[in-house]
Image: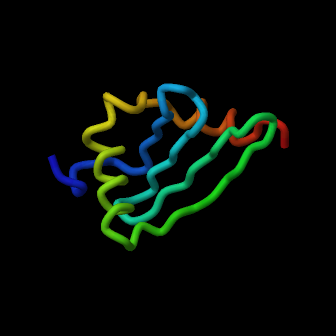
Amino acid sequence: MKFEDINFPVYRKYKNSKSYFKIIHPRLFEEIQLVGSKKIVKQVNAVQFPEINFVRDMVFNFSDMAFEINEEEYNAVKLLGS
């Protein structure tokens, strides 16, 4: 499967439920980190090789580190505490 076959955005969360991801396209993703009672939201432009590999892994090889989630779950976390 290739990136061209993916219907973006796709959503993932780490198995520990501390980080949530919205992969917007192969070079752009948004991350929500839950640190204690704080929420950190950042958008990352994947330009360096490790970031590009991270996006590829989160789209294609995520089962060891993350779960697939839907947009509603992602948005609920994003709105949490707002």
26 versus 71 height, above or below: below
| Residue drawn where x is 64% and y is 44% of the image | 33
Query: In front here: 72 or 80?
Result: 80
Residue 52: image location, x then y, percent: 33, 62
Q: Residue at x 50, y 32 (%)?
A: 70
Give how far across and how far down residue 30 sits, in percent: 55, 54
Tell which residue pokes out farthest to the left in this image. Answer: 1
Q: Quadrant of the C terminus?
A: top right
What colouring method underlies this structural image? rainbow
Residue 32 in the figure: left or right of residue 7? right
- Up the image or down, 15 lies above or below 23; here it is above
Using the rendered view, name the quadrant where residue 71 is placed: top right
Number of disc labels: 0
Classify 60 as above or below 17: below
Please provide percent x and percent y for residue 44.
52, 64
Q: Nearer the viewer, residue 69 or 55?
A: 55
Q: Residue at x 63, y 46 (%)?
A: 32
- Viewed as shown, does residue 62 lie left or right of 29? left
Q: Residue furthest right?
A: 82
State the residue at coordinates (34%, 62%): 50
Q: Decide if residue 25 is on the left or right side of residue 38.
A: left
